Image (tube, grey):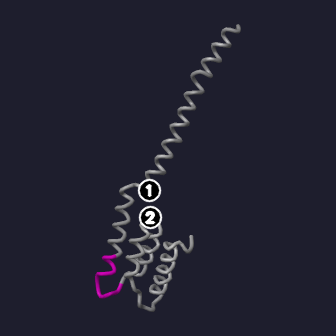
Amino acid sequence: MITFEWIALGLIIFGMVIPFWMLVIITIMAVEGNRKRDKSGNTSYVHDYARLVKSMNEDLKSGDGKFNGPAMIAYLRDLRDYPQYREPTLLFLEEISITGSGKFDEVCKAELKSLETYLLGLTK
């Protein structure tokens, strides 16, 4: 190959191929960044939280004052996934009083206390 051909080949590689792949990489990084940002503002996230609180409230208000212990424990643990709704969650949790002395009652009391401590920022 003569010098002109090497120069032409170099211009093609450095002038077209490398910028193309750089553009692809930058686009992928931008898309991933948008996905991470959109997760916090996702409307289905709000609906999931509202559905969880509604289900929890219905379980607490229905029946003769008793609740489903395993379901309540799962509800309380799921509320940790919504720290951005800390204030309404804390207000909701203030209304819950667990007075029983069974094993699920004790676990629910511990979970409730742990969740309140977490949401108040006292632990991670």
Near mark 2 (Cα within 10 A), the count class, few <14, some 14-19 or many ≥20, is: few
Do callouts 1 and 2 mark residues in contact (Cβ within 8 Å)? Answer: yes
Q: Secondary structure at mark 2?
A: helix
Task: Check residue 40 in the rendering and tell me which mark sits there, or answer none.
Answer: 1
Point out the image quarter for the C terminus.
bottom right
Placement of 81 over or under 95, stated as above or below: above
Which of the two discs, 1 and 2, labels the residue nearer the N terminus? 1
Which sits in the foreground, 106 or 47? 47
Image quarter for residue 53? bottom left
Amino acid at pointer 2:
Gln
Amino acid at pointer 1:
Ser
The residue at which mark 2 appears reads as: 84
Give the x, y percent position of residue 25: 55, 36
Left or right: 21 with respect to 101? Answer: right
Which sits in the foreground, 4 or 103? 4
**Residue in the picture at 66% in, 13% down:** 7
Query: Does the magenta segment cover residue 103?
Result: no
